[in-house]
Image: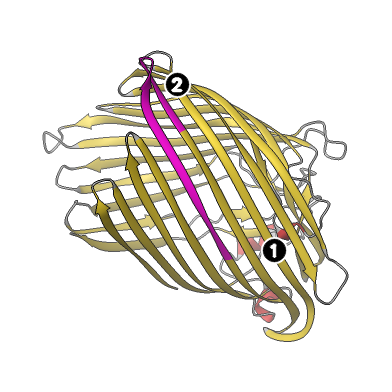
Amino acid sequence: MARLNANLGYRLSANAETRFYVNANTWNGELPGEVTKAQALKSPKEANPYWVFLDQQRNIDSVRVANKTTLRIDGTTVEFGAFTHQRYVDHPIYEYLDYDVSDYGGFVRATDDRMIGGFRNRLIVGANVLNGTFDYKQFVNNAGKKGALTTSLDWESENYSAYVENSFSVTPNVALIAGTQFMHVVREQRDRIGANSGSNDYDLWSPKVGILWDVDPGWQVFANISRSAEVPTFDANAFNIKAQTATTYEIGTRGSRPDFRWDVSLYRAEIDDELQCLTVVFSPFFTAPCVIQNADKTVHQGVEAGFGLAFLKSTFDIEDRVWLNVVYTYNDFFFDNDVLWGNNQLPGVAPHNFRAELLYNHPSGFYAGPNVEWMADAFYADNANTLKVDPYALLGFRLGYDQSKGWSGYVEGRNLLDERYIATTITTGNADPSMELFNPGTGRAVYGGVQYRW
């Protein structure tokens, strides 16, 4: 893999500046493929033999060029810009995929922050354009070589959105927030060798309301209700797929004290027509790419929590600290009285995830400490809830030296006990133990890096 990131900015005046960005990437990777649950746990280093026979790969060359310009005029900040992103993908899998993607677009955003009648008011308005073309071809995969052409498609995508949001402070510490976004989306497919042409248009509104309470300068409490929408990509494989929409309720708090910090939120999203990517297994030697389907009604609810506590101080230096950092997520995702799946759990998502770290921090920039990653409960690989991914816990350790200028570096050991576990799974409707759905997790590994700042 090779990557280049560069940017160049110029200050036109005290209230105007512009910056150009260039990102270029070359990425070449062999794909080991999913395996059965037993194979993933018994022989995690072995690739799927059929994937090896087909020499399955993902090779991407891409270049992105963008500009952003900022103007400040009497309390109003205006930002606008444009971009283009060109990609070529050489991707032999079950068939040999070969395609060129050209994305382009722009944005404009204005933020006005001023006092109105003695009350602070912050207004944001903006618009985005993201369009693209997709020259897509598939060939028979003859052991990693292109065979006969099987699919030739021309895809065009148009995405236009406009939004407005206003935050009005009814008191110095409490702000009421309201806004909405409108999206107009077009998906068009022209089949150059067959009869599978068609198009879909989507017009979607996403309003929201909320409240933000600054209890003190280091403590916030918030609550909001929002609508959201997601349209299917061309991977949806059909033009009768609906857009996914949701209403989300959220309440939470975040803040910090000298030796304690926290960020906790509770949420519930009631979703209509959730986009599910379900894999079809035709035989032990052939797994088709996933097919996008709409579930009827689903619910995503849970907790996202993180906190840090300095419980040992001034051990070797008056300013040093030992921090306990913990991140926890609870995911309760399920079908809501589905005709086929009832109230089953949605597949592919673990209910409980913990990450904890004890980290010694010295004011010189030195840090060191162990960490634990724990998936505390099993989850399912299928809508029918018949095949589970087992819990696991991983032990790690990292140490390093970090400073704002000069040399910094780190060394990190992960999965030090060489635990065998399943990291991810693709999902299906009804699974059985013979299906190749699973990706084993990485074994014992050591990473390191250095950087220089000036």
Magenta segment includes 326: no
- What type of secondary structure mainly makes up the magenta span? strand
Please state which of residues 332 and 92 is positioned toward the viewer in this rendering.
Answer: 92
Q: Is the N terminus in the top left, top right, bottom left or bottom right quadrant?
A: bottom left
Numbered mark located on residue 168 in the image: 2
Q: Residue at x 19, y 51 (%)?
A: 404
Q: Residue at x 34, y 51 (%)?
A: 397
Residue 439 lies, in percent from the top left, at 61, 60
Please state which of residues 154 and 357 is positioned toward the viewer in this rendering.
Answer: 154
Residue 354 lies, in percent from the top left, at 48, 39
Q: Residue at x 47, y 23 (%)?
A: 222
Q: Label 1 amino acid?
A: Glu
Secondary structure under the numbered disc 1 in the rendered image: strand
Residue 281 lies, in percent from the top left, at 80, 62
Q: Is the C terminus in the top left, top right, bottom left or bottom right quadrant?
A: bottom left
Please identify the quarter of the rendering in which residue 187 is found.
bottom right
- The boundaries of the magenta stretch are 103-123
- Disc 1: which residue: 156
Please state which of residues 46 and 317 is positioned toward the viewer in this rendering.
Answer: 317
Secondary structure under the numbered disc 2 in the rendered image: strand
Above or below, comparing residue 409 to residue 386 in the picture: below
Please identify the quarter of the rendering in which residue 24 is found.
bottom left
Q: Label 2 amino acid?
A: Phe
Magenta segment includes 118: yes
Q: How many labels, in total?
A: 2
Can residue 257 be seen? Answer: yes
